Amino acid sequence: MTEIPKLRLGVNVDHVATVRNARGGAHPDPVSAAQCAIGAGADGITAHLREDRRHIVDDDIARLRAEIAKPLNLEMAATEEMVGIAVKVRPHAACLVPERRQERTTEGGLDVAGQHDALAPVVAKLKDAGIRVSLFIAADPRQIETAAQISAPVIEIHTGAWCDAIADGRAAAAAAEWERIRQGARLARAAGLEVHAGHGLSYATAETIAALAEVVELNIGHFLVGEALFDGLAAAVRAMRAAMDRGRG
């Protein structure tokens, strides 16, 4: 019987920085939040350095790289500036995401198929620097196949549409999105890609997606920071870890 891979939890600390930046100063500190999350069971930390520095800033990335004991996953746009920062900082991983300044959060997956020629050299440069590259994409066969063609070792499936459909009570749409995720994860794994997932996940949806053996990592941030307001970050991370373990089991 094939053993199901361990499901890793990456905790995104962007919105700890959002709270800090609302008032200025140094509190709350996303690096302290990252250390708390690791102590509660997180397997890694994710942070998105946006071009407008709306939450995470350059110093946060440098400190996370230097001060946390688990892998750092740098979410970034595929721009010359961000590639230069990644090559200098050398995080464990870099997840390429689409970015528009007017959006509140990342609204969709990267168009790898449409940006093949632009993304292929970015993937190659990051890999040459020893950085594990992932592409944040919809569970669309064309995007998955192109990700494999440009030699990105990892994809992260955008789960936002599925989570939104569930939250809105749109059962048919949720079922269709779930089937797309399930089939996409299977296709990606068959193509030799490591499969991660994230965006909009809650305890319930993380427990559900944990049942997909092809998925080996979930990256979750906004929900955990929101729950931390009521229960504390460590408790929220432990509850998420328990939900994921239930789903995997």
Image (cartoon, rainbow, N blue to C red):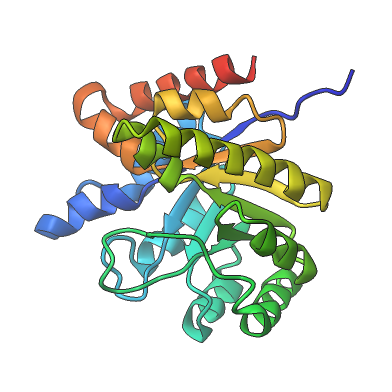
In the displayed orientation, state which residue is furthest to the left.
23
Which of these two is toward me, 215 or 72?
215
Image point (39%, 33%), residue name:
36
Percent across and percent down for residue 192 are: 82, 51
Q: Residue at x 45, y 29 (%)?
A: 205
Task: Left or right? Give the position of 215 relative to 5.
Answer: left
**Relative side of 248 to 178, left or right:** right
Residue at x 59% of width, y 42% of height: 181
Which residue is at the far right? Answer: 1
Place of residue 129 in the rendered image (x, y in percent of width and height, measured from the top left): 70, 72
Picture coordinates of residue 51, whole percent (x, y): 36, 75
Residue 162 drawn above or below residue 60: above
Specify whether residue 117 is in view: yes
Say whether residue 238 is left or right of residue 52: right
Quadrant into which the C terminus falls: top right
**Vertical side of 213 occupied by 129: above or below:** below
Q: Quadrant of the N terminus?
A: top right
Please identify the residue farthest to the front as the structure is shown.
Answer: 172
Q: 113 or 133: which is nearer to us?
A: 113
Residue visible at 42% across and 23% down?
Answer: 204
Is residue 132 among what the camera can see? no
In the rendered picture of this protein, how many numbered marks are placed on residues?
A: 0
Asked if residue 22 is positioned above or below residue 13 in the image, the reply reads below
Say whether residue 186 is left or right of residue 70. right
Q: Tell which of 154 and 37 is nearer to you.
A: 154
Q: Quadrant of residue 62?
A: bottom left
State the image coordinates of residue 171 (x, y, percent, origin top left). Answer: 40, 30
